[in-house]
Image (cartoon, rainbow, N blue to C red):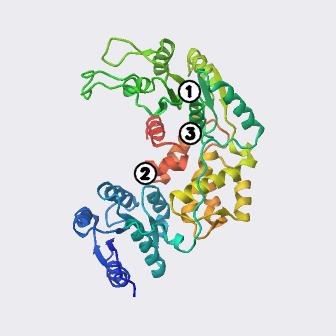
Amino acid sequence: MATKTGNILVVDDNASIRQTLKLLLPMHFGKVEAIASPTTLIATIGTFKPDVVLLDMNFKTEVNTGNEGLYWIREIKAIAPDVEVVLFTAYADVELAVEGMKRGAFDFIVKPWDNTKLVEVLSAARDKAQNVGGGSSRQAKKTAEPKQAPSGMFWGTSDAMEAIRRTVEKIAPTDASVLITGENGTGKDVMAREIHARSSRSAGPMVAVDAGAIPETLFESELFGHVKGAFTDAHTDHAGRFEQANGGTLFLDEVGNLPLHLQAKLLRAIQSRSIVRVGGTQPTPVDIRLICATNMNLEQLVNEGRFREDLYYRINTVHIELPPLRSRADDILPLAERFLADNAQKYHRLVTGIDDNASRALAQHRWSGNIRELQNCIEKAVIMSEGSQLTVDDLQLNKLKQSNFLSQFGFYTDEDEEEQVRRAVSQCRGNVSAAAKLLNISRPTLYAKMKKYGL
């Protein structure tokens, strides 16, 4: 009989669950400890030294959203990065369990659980913690290795992307300012990095800034830096993003969200190619290549007096308009396969393909969130998959369609955007991370929009 190894720590406030697991798990593992509250979790890790923590997502507090589980994943990984975390969750919290895996959890088990599957998952997590082969329980059932994730820019086969590729080949080696536009999720940040990688500045830094998410009071300090004593919390000199990007590329995302008075300060720095730190007096020269991006129609904003015309022409030496994914139908499946390979490796899943029904569903779906929506869909499907191929059930496209509040047409009116933001924040019960994911935007961008609409 094989020697039982591994220390398993169960954290669950349900006494009957703790009692059941205290009977089941010792038949398969070396030591098992169970505690009712995460308040003693950190201390118990120090004394019990578990290989695996089986962590409930919710505890008996006033808030029952699973956020406690996400919080404790972070705390465990901070003090004991080699300890594997398996999440214990009700079916209704599967979305949060998936988010937990993205934050470092090894896997999750849905209550009520199957004993065999629970032991398999905990055994695989123990093996990984002890460096005895690693991998998830689903790996134990297969022998193939996951395909290596492809890297680099995916140009696809559409005429529009081929024209963009030729443009990038011509302008990337220059220092011309580039404006990248397109709907949310079309890959503007990826395109910016591709231009930088192909430029003569590729050995230098690329500094990315979500310009629309910087609080107005911190805009100058963030972009131009400050000197010690410039304001209350300025304890040391600080180099801003312009200086950090010196010799490389500065990427300003969401530039269309900047208010007019901040646009003037940005224009001054671009024109002079120098900055003055907040609290300082001496200009500092900066050598940067500027790339900007927005999902807004800047020409329309110029006509409405909401964006400076002189700034528009400064940042728009070359304009690249990225097409929506729905106009690149032939690229959907190749992109999905790339994302599958990437996430199969990332999450230790031996998913090797997409079945025919799922492939047809992907091709027919209207990807209003574009490449980012497709990427999120495949990431979640890989995590949820039980087999070697993704199925229609894994994709959950009907649920995705119902919950996607993104504009179908590319540019929001303020009224539409405000309604979408309010609905997302309400549906996610104030969880900013979840709402940002639902809207396919970054957390800083969502914070900026919430401030804009008084949420």
Image: 67 above or below 141 = above
What residue sits right under mark 3 in the picture?
Answer: 417
- Give percent across and percent down for residue 16: 33, 81
Identity, as a three-letter code, of the amino acid under mark 2: Asn
For the point 25% across and 70% down, the residue is 48
* Number of residues whose C-alpha sits closer than 10 Å to that of mark 1, classed few (under 14), some (14–19) or many (20 or more): many
Expressed as whole percent of the image width and height from the top left, the position of residue 45 reads 26, 65
Task: Work out which quarter of the rendered image holds the C terminus and state it.
Answer: top left
Mark 2 or mark 3, which is nearer to you? 2
Which amino acid, mark 1?
Ile
Q: Is residue 350 visible?
A: yes
Which residue, given by chain and number where applicable, does mark 2 sit on?
A: 431
Q: Is residue 37 left or right of residue 427?
A: left
Q: Nearer the viewer, residue 362 or 352?
A: 352
Category of crowding for the residue at label 2, using alpha-carbon neighbours closer than 10 angstroms: few (below 14), some (14–19), many (at least 20): some
Question: What residue sits 61% from the left and 57% below the top?
Answer: 340
Query: Which type of secondary structure does the marked residue at label 1 adopt?
Result: strand
Cα–Cα gap, marks 2 and 1? 32 Å
Distance from Cα at disc 2 to Cα at disc 3: 18 Å
Q: Which residue is mark 1?
A: 291
Choose mark 2 or mark 1, whichever is in front. 1
First reached walking from the N terminus: tag 3 or tag 1: 1
Tell which circle, 2 or 1, labels the residue nearer the N-terminal end: 1
Against 74, residue 140 (above or below) is below
